[in-house]
Image: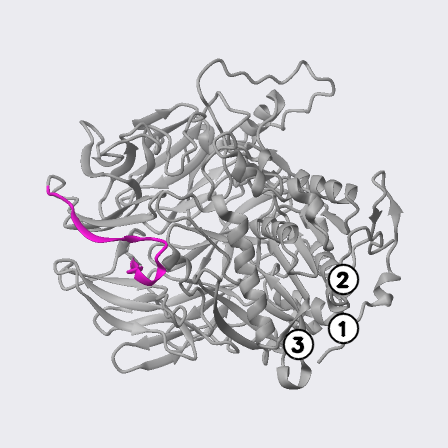
Amino acid sequence: MKALALSSAIVLLLLPTMTAFGQTDLVYQIPPEEIAALADAPKTPSVLLSPTGEHMVLRLRRGLPGIDVVSQPELRLGGLRINPRTNGPSRGWYYRGLKFLQVADGRERDVTGLPPDPKISYVSWSPDGKWIAFTITNGGQVELWAADLNTGQARKRTYRALNAAIGRPYEWVSDSRTIVAKTIPSSRGEAPPEPTVPSGPAIQENIGGRRPARTYQDMLKNPYDERLFEHCLSTRIVRIGLDGKEQPVGQQGMIWSVTPSPDGKYILVETFRRPFSYSVPYYRFPRRIEVWDADGNVVKQLADLPLADNVPIAFSSVPTGPRAVDWRQDADATLYWAEALDGGDAGSEADERDRICMLEAPFEGEPVPLVTFGLRFHELRWSDDELALTSEWWWATRRLRVWAVEPGAPEKAPRLMMDYSYEDRYSDPGKPMMMSVDNGASLMVTANDGKTIFLRGDGASPEGDRPFLDEFDIETKETNRLFRSEAPCYERAVSILDVTEREILTRRESVSEVPNYYVRTLGNDSLRRVTRFSHPTPQLLDVQKEMIRYERADGVALTGTLYLPAGYSAETDGPLPMLMWAYPHEFKSAAAAGQVTGSPYRFVRISTHSPLYWLVHGYAVLDNPSLPIVGEGNVEPNDTHVEQLVAGAQAAVDEVVKRGVADRDRTAIGGHSYGAFMTANLLAHSDLFAAGIARSGAYNRTLTPFGFQREERTFWEAPGAYFAMSPFLHADKINEPLLLIHGEMDNSSGTLPIQSERLYGALKGHGATVRLVMLPHESHGYRGRESVMHMLWEMTEWLDRYVANAKPGMKTKGATESLGQ
């Protein structure tokens, strides 16, 4: 076992400079070696299966980018974050290389011809599975590349720069030889210069009409932002052949998305237009939805949608007009879309909420109704003229219904296939398995002349998640289980490779075995390994993992995943200091709230924001202990949020102390985002923890007055709940040390950096022990290696000082010491 002690050597590395707030700024620090090694561990490749199922492309992942990458220039416009140098996303993740792998024998071939240290993204297979396309961000532009499966040779396909400011910058056409790309027009010119002197004030106005809006980040602020938005999204569509031929298509515009039809003859195009808004994100801006032919002629304008700044804030509300517009995957060129029948207002009474309509090429005449819903449209999966599955859902009741329809005979009444609560994980029947066909369309896998589909699900159960694969008879609605994951492994179906031979591709892992891919033959339990990824963090190989079960005082069943350091024994080593890391969830059913989540057999993997780092530093970790907030019937869960939160935390602490693995006086609570909000509330309303760590949270709910998380009531409708749930308003009750960490450029709804700054000020004013760490250039999640390492250093120092070395019954209100001072 590793000894726990505050490292004076690390403290001596601090280089303080005083700011106007009297706080100490530091250079970036590195955590203890054993923790830093986990953060720098190699990343397991990600896998993309070819449409034929015969090959994979392995995408080799990069380590954490440097802060020099994270701090590149960034435009924050209408909810988008754009790097003005590349006209691509400013916070994208890149791959460092690609490999082809043959599923039959596991042979690998490097993709060659790439530039040194390539920044690869947007990898996709051609419909026939013989090519991959991808982008490389190179210098000042995003480039389109493609590689031949047969040779492994990659080559840049055009010298035009792609416009990757929003959405995918390209799509394959069904012929597998042509790509439709969004490019930057040569006539676009330079970005508009920022005014050195303002020409006047920025003004917003509302004259009558209720337009409540939730709290959004990165909105347009002035006419200059509007011009920048228009400049960055200015796009020209170009058809690019693998043979080098290029053809510009249509007129340039602020193009959001381009989607070729399954037959390749048309393109579905969504284009933004003015006027913009300073209060809602880009996806609420006015836009046109059109169908273009291959030459760019507009053959159908499906919709000219206005600014959607008056969508009701009740959950399940939607904008009016066509939405979720797409191509029928089983037809050559038939559009479908959803449209609200209730004005989009989930708060209104209505027997009919949504309708799905279809319109076939040449897009003349009236749309054909396919199905009408009493709830809100969820999704649609296609098979053929005789079968499609579509679903509807409703937030207030957590209800989800699945219907079978006949697209070729829309006059036939839909047949109800499934009806269940989507928060009831034990009853989840699973989702249909899909396959790619020759033209790139995605269809349901079927058997028995289309009468059988295959359902894949998590298999939640009192034993934990046990993924399954079922046959489902559309006519009888009966299921037949083909496969279910068995202990001590966690295995899930990825793809059906051969329906007749019952061969499936699975992803299989265990606590100590890294996930790898296998071909499993159903019926005879034949299992053949395809990939051979190695363990990225062997230092965690012998970590102890257990799913524990216990009860809240009111009888609600709870679970959590307990991790203990390698070689630890409660009998000989005694209780450890513990970090509990959690995130509360709301439920409408106590039974659903008590269901087991997760699996005891999943691989012990470290992610950037994981609490598991401290296992190699001598701590026990209780990850994701259940903290359900239940409100059954007409009762709102958040009306008793604090009471239920404290009761759940009390039960978790009691359980780990009873087991002898944790010290009641040396337990910390922590969380990210809503988990940070939870942390501050638990310190304000209980004395269960020695200290807390809250990252990127929201603490004053009056700053999100039109709803937050799963609370759809406004502040004016439920002021008591907003007051009770805001730890900022109870800052005088927090008497345990609290570490606050926040990205300076947080863009998550509600978690503005000011949330942490104001809580810090309130706690400081009441004499609490508190530390505020603002990470430059970081958003809601932290990406830069320097930022992540410093976060780990801060958390380690805080835990060592205020948890590992805490004295029984010690409270710290009024303490003035602070790390680095």
The residue tagged 2 is: 810
Q: Nearer the viewer, mark 2 or mark 3?
A: 2
User: What residue span does the magenta drawing correspond to?
Assistant: 412-434
Q: Earlier in the sequence, mark 1 or mark 3?
A: 1
SS for dot 1:
loop
Check disc 2 and give the amino acid type.
Answer: Met
The residue tagged 3 is: 575
Q: Quadrant of residue 611?
A: bottom right
Q: Quadrant of residue 458?
A: bottom left
The residue tagged 1 is: 4
> At which x and y percent is residue 182?
47, 38
Do residues under tags 1 and 3 come within 8 Å of each other at their CB atoms? no
Left or right side of 357 for 218 = right
Q: Earlier in the sequence, mark 2 or mark 1?
A: 1
Left or right side of 692 for 427 = left
As rendered, which of 730 and 483 lies closer to the eye? Answer: 730
Disc 2 and disc 3: Cα gap in Å? Answer: 18 Å
Disc 2 and disc 1: Cα gap in Å? Answer: 18 Å
The residue carrying pointer 3 sits among few (fewer than 14), some (14 to 19) or many (20 or more) residues within 10 Å by Cα, namely many
